[in-house]
Amino acid sequence: MNVNMSYNDRRVQKAVNIYSKPLLWVYDFIVYQLATPYMLHCPADLILEHYNENIRPNHLDVGVGTGCLLKGCKQLKDIKRLGIMDLNPNSLEKSKQLLNEQHPEVYQANILKPFETTAIDFDSIGMNYLLHCVPGNFEEKEVIFENLKEHLSKDGILFGCTVLGKDINNALHTKLFLKLYQWIGIFNNAEDTHTGLKKSLSRHFTYYEVNVVGNVAFFRASDCSFL
Ligand SMILES: C[S@@+](CC[C@H](N)C(=O)[O-])C[C@H]1O[C@@H](n2cnc3c(N)ncnc32)[C@H](O)[C@@H]1O
């Protein structure tokens, strides 16, 4: 690790480095078969439904992980242009393999920093289970919305879900699970609340929705009405 990195950069890198090749082999099972339904009290199918409802044929997926959500989407066959973005090269390699029929444009970037690329004019941007990885509270994280808007078309939609860490009525096993993941550095969501997410979205988008199921907040936002 580079000793000149700031404290925040080190936390970002720590949260990203966790996605090693071996972990990515078991990631889908752990996250969607175990953690989401049993620890976070949210049926995993709802996440795929959220993707199916919001994805558009010209789509950028940020913090793509293994790419399994995109692969499971009903609309995958209708995708005309697909971008995948992640800071972790393992995630990019794995998802690129899984989605090779869609010939994805691949972008390695830290979404907390602005980046100049050809990744512009996407009609939808998906960012699933990404915000809770990123250090800081929502006021600090919301720079992501500002950065990603640069890559969204004028009437495009940003959507995804994230695990909330505060002001949620947690069962004991969920509290322990969150504390363990926060301690390891997988989650950086100790300050993430439903209200905080809504406020951050409202500062960047004209229209936004947040719905919470269990510990998972589903959101979508746009400058063009989707209601
Ligand atoms: C929890 S996984 C989510 C994967 C997938 N979207 C899903 O829902 O299953 C988080 C992904 O976001 C990436 N990531 C975390 N922080 C990032 C950052 N600051 N910039 C870009 N990618 C980041 C990680 O490398 C990892 O691939």
Image: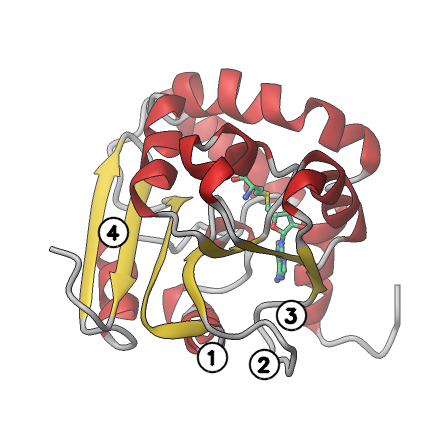
Q: Is residue 212 left or right of residue 71?
A: left
Residue occupied by mark 2: 114
Numbered disc in front, either 2 or 4: 2
Determine whether, in the image, residue 125 is placed left or right of residue 115: left
Residue highlighted by disc 1: 150
Mark nearer the N terminus (2 vs 3): 3
* Disc 4/disc 3 C-alpha distance (Å): 23 Å
Q: Is mark 3 within 8 Å of ligand 1?
A: no
Q: Three-letter amino acid code at disc 3?
A: Asn
Residue type at the position of mark 2: Pro
Q: Is residue 173 visible?
A: no
From the top left corner, tell me how far across and down residue 202 is, in percent: 22, 71
Which is in the foreground here, disc 1 or disc 2? 1
**Mark 1 and mark 3: Cα distance apart in space:** 23 Å
Does the Cβ of the disc 2 residue fall within 8 Å of ligand 1? no
Label 2 to label 3, Cα distance in Å?
Answer: 16 Å
Q: Mark 1 to mark 4: distance in Å?
A: 25 Å
Marks 1 and 2, the one that precedes in the sequence: 2
Residue at 60% x, 25% y is 28
In primary-sequence order, the first of circles 4 and 3 is 3
Q: Which residue is mark 4?
A: 194
Residue neighbourhood size for the residue with mark 3, other residues' Cα within 10 Å, grouped as few (<14), some (14–19), many (≥20): few
Q: CA distance from mark 2 to mark 4?
A: 26 Å
Which three-letter amino acid code belongs to the residue tagged 1? Glu
Q: Secondary structure at mark 3?
A: helix
Query: Where, quadrant-wise, is the N terminus in this rendering?
Result: bottom right
Q: Are marks 1 and 2 in contact (CB under 8 Å)?
A: yes
Q: Who's the residue at 25% across and 73% down the image? A: 205
